[in-house]
Image: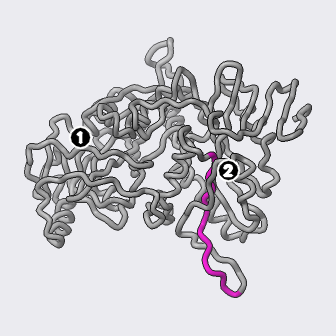
Amino acid sequence: AQGLVVKRQVVTSSARGYDIMQRHRRQDHVPSQKANPGSKVEYLSGVGMINADGLDVPFDVVNAWSRLLDDDMPRTDWVLFSYPFNTRGASATNVHEIAVVGEGTGGMSSMKSMLSTVGVAIGGFRVMAIDGESVRTKVIFILYTSSEAPTKHRAMMARHKGALLRHCISGIHVEFQLDSPDDLTEQMVVEKLLSSGGAHTARAFDFMHASSTSFNIDGDAAGHAPPPTPARTEKNNDDDDDDDLLSTSGAVNNGEKEGVMDKIANTAAEEGNDMQETTSSPPMDMTSESITEPIGDTGVEVEHRCIGAWARVLDDSCASNWLLMGYPPLTSFGGRQRWDTSLVVVQGEGPGGLDEMVSNLESGSVYLGGFKVVAVDGESRRGKFVCIFFAPITAPVRIRAMAAQLKGSLKAHVLSGTHIDLEVSRATDLTAQVVAEKLVSSGGAHSATTFIF
């Protein structure tokens, strides 16, 4: 932009009205808010909007999804978002803004009853996956586009699904696209969770019915409340590969459960586990590099350490400002470098901001990652998160192509809450000036005058 002068890592412009400064201390971060002491989930404070690729997302939408993920908020186990009605009446809907239309307890069944009142919606609900030793939260994402809804609304909601996944919604394990509430059954959810699982198999699922009735593996009502939800470690709801939890609680009738229950009974018989009741175990160490989970249906897995590393970037109480992920290198063969393209791992993280991250980019490797910038105006300071895709021309064409194809799924799976995307082929293209200009052009009600890197 014209009028910008770079000097001693400070960019000023009276024409554009913003400064860029280098961050050296953690206290420059934007203050965060947590619903309860010890909560691992962050909430946005105040009243405002996030611009998600042209869709206005109020803070209360982001916070409603956070409550769904938060084990310290047991009163929310489903949420539903749709377009708000404008002042012209129910027949006219503002399709450029999303709103919370439902939130509460009762699990999937309560959410389905709310679906009948809206034409299109995006939402999610919690399911507890249980085995004899542990309990895990599974988050089910749904896109609902009723065949009776206007074609425009159906198309816009399908389009906005991607924007919400890129900017606001994270932590999902499986997803469903529905034309009718009747398209979603507990049997379907159980089977999809089973098929998407990792090395371990759960024995029961609790669908969080208001009756709190549980079923053992024989399908008999046990008449007791489901096991308590354990405290979450970093991004515990993202631990697909820790699916050592699977039995089925909730009002599943015997006809629906036959196929799934046969699988469960066979596994239980092999292990000699009667599964009459389950108890929670200490949470697993989600930073272990040996723990991975699939990235959707891409055939590629990501180590849980990536999820924990990005959670630290988002967390103002952690001294981490950037993350780089990529394929792990293999032993070179015939002088040629090779990579394991079936796995994504952490390649670097740290507290030093943009310059430190750029210094860790190797010219022959491809990276996907992100970093934090603090946007400051005269009254407030807000965290801005930038997603970067680095694919240098010196990297093999095949690796660049595979990473580009994986980029969208990996970003939705790990890099939640980013505000802008940057794709570069040279490290020198990643400058504070470039980032600040794109943040300013991305708009929004918050017009920053200073960006701290």
Kind of element beneath mark 2: strand
State the image coordinates of residue 301 (x, y, percent, origin top left): 49, 63
- Cα distance in 3D space between marks 2 and 1: 38 Å
In this rendering, position of residue 256 left or right of residue 314:
left
Residue 28 lies, with reference to residue 350, above or below; the image says: above
In this view of the protein, can residue 437 be seen by the observer? Answer: yes
Residue 8 lies, with reference to residue 264, above or below; the image says: above
In this view of the protein, can residue 163 be seen by the observer? Answer: no
Q: Nearer the viewer, residue 184 or 260?
A: 260
Q: Is residue 54 magenta?
A: no
Quadrant (top left/top right/bottom left/bottom right) for the N terminus: top right
State the image coordinates of residue 175 (x, y, percent, origin top left): 40, 48
The circle on residue 208 is 1
Residue shown at the point (49%, 52%) measured from the top left: 308
Q: Earlier in the sequence, mark 2 or mark 1?
A: 1
> Overall secondary structure of the magenta stretch?
strand
- Mark 1 surroundings within 10 Å by alpha-carbon count, few (fewer than 14), some (14 through 19), many (20 or more): many
Residue shown at the point (38%, 43%) measured from the top left: 178
Quadrant (top left/top right/bottom left/bottom right) for the C terminus: top right
Residue shown at the point (17%, 60%) measured from the top left: 261
Residue shown at the point (57%, 51%) measured from the top left: 411
In this rendering, position of residue 277 left or right of residue 237:
left
Count of marks overlaid on the render: 2
In this rendering, position of residue 247 left or right of residue 33:
left
Which region of the structure is painted magenta? 321-334
Kind of element beneath mark 1: loop
User: Disc 1 marks which amino acid?
Assistant: Met
Q: Pointer 2: what residue?
A: 388
The circle on residue 94 is none
User: Disc 2 marks which amino acid?
Assistant: Ile
Residue 17 lies, with reference to residue 413, above or below; the image says: above
- Mark 2 surroundings within 10 Å by alpha-carbon count, few (fewer than 14), some (14 through 19), many (20 or more): many
